[in-house]
Image: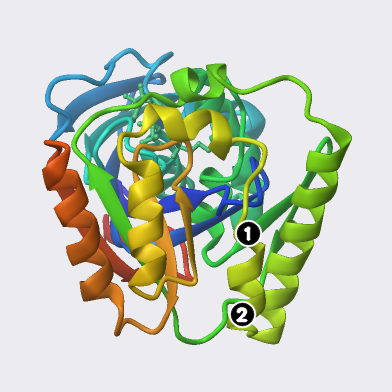
Amino acid sequence: MMRSVKAFAPATVANVSCGFDILGFPIDAMGDYVEVTRRDRPGLRVVSIEDDGGKLPWEVEKNTCAVAIQAMLESYGKQVGMDIALRKGLPLGSGMGSSAASAVAALVAANRLLGDPFERKDLLPFAIVAEKAACGAGHADNVAPSLLGGFVLIRDYHPLDVIKLHVPKGLYCTLLHPHFELNTSDSRSVLRDSIPLKHSTIQSGNVAGFVSGLYQEDFELISRSMRDVIAEPYRAVLIPGFYEVRESLKAAGALGMGISGSGPTLFALSKGSEQTAAMAKAAEEIYEGIGLGVDVYFSAINTVGAYVLEEKN
Ligand SMILES: Nc1ncnc2c1ncn2[C@@H]1O[C@H](COP(=O)(O)OP(=O)(O)O)[C@@H](O)[C@H]1O
Ligand SMILES: N[C@@H](CCOP(=O)(O)O)C(=O)O
């Protein structure tokens, strides 16, 4: 019987401009690490959290690692005792699926500790419970791609219908993380409950175009489809320099760009990695002008999702 398992779950770009709450992909550049260790008494404990600046909750009903594992154990039908150690590789409130990566890494580790009783896709509802605990909304567009890898479409939430999409060769992602936190719950609170019919038409056309573009490996179609009339207009005002950075990234060769998840990180897709240095330089100059530090990450699209790093007997 396994004694402890360590797993990694990648950061994710949710929405991908046109797919609010229904589209996302993981990146290779970074993620969260969770180790779960069996204990002889039932019950979960968070025993260590590293690299969170002391900001994350240790309570099992609040930390997404524990919330996700608890949901899994309820479905498993047996209370197995586990100690949970989390190392944050992701900045908080960044728009890169930080709460999701913790939950997914915890689930993949705990599932393996139990001998993999759940298939990968069957872990998703447990990760959604954790996401809801973290930001008040059970959106799956971070947890699903972090768990499954590649572009993932959430066709429906009730019941869950999740589809892995084709990843075109040579598609590359640049992430710009300006140094401030924007909590997902805050950037969801600026959104409207209803949208005009004409916006629904524009958004559906673009999400269909984006998915077709992936399958046809048609980078021009992907580029044309990266438009968001639902969330971006309301959220852009929360992100200093958004429109300027958008123009500079496009001028530097991005296929398209948008807000990663709920921001403040911005993402750009490009065909290949040749333009990424120019994109980063252009954006860095703008952020410097507005007095904001920025971290830049480059990554291929991660196609495998979370994985087990180490098992100890
Ligand atoms: N392991 C975790 N447990 C509980 N809350 C977390 C965890 N990781 C991140 N969070 C919190 O979840 C909230 C949602 O934001 P987060 O997922 O970090 O945003 P983003 O995905 O935009 O980076 C934030 O308040 C963040 O501090
Ligand atoms: N679809 C969600 C995605 C939130 O992503 P995060 O990385 O900012 O948590 C939304 O747009 O609110």
Q: Along the line of sight, which residue is nearer the eye, 283 or 180?
A: 283
Q: Nearer the viewer, mark 1 or mark 2?
A: 2
Q: Is residue 111 visible?
A: yes
- The residue at the point 48 percent across, 42 percent down is 261
- x, y percent for residue 285: 15, 55
- What residue is pinned by disc 2? 220
Name the quarter where the C terminus is drawn: bottom left
Q: Count up the numbered dots.
A: 2
Circle 2 residues within 10 Å: few <14, some 14–19, many ≥20: few
- x, y percent for residue 24: 56, 54
- Residue type at mark 1: give it: Val
Q: Name the element at disc 2.
A: helix
Residue 159 image-quadrant placement: top right
The quadrant of the picture showing ligand 1 is top left
**Cβ atoms under marks 1 and 2 closer than 8 Å:** no
Residue 207 image-quadrant placement: bottom right
- The residue at the point 78 percent across, 41 percent down is 199
- The residue at the point 58 percent across, 64 percent down is 151
Residue 193 image-quadrant placement: top right
- x, y percent for residue 295: 17, 51
Q: Along the line of sight, which residue is nearer the eye, 230 or 152?
A: 230
Q: Name the element at disc 1.
A: strand
- What residue is pinned by disc 1? 152
- The residue at the point 34 percent across, 49 percent down is 244
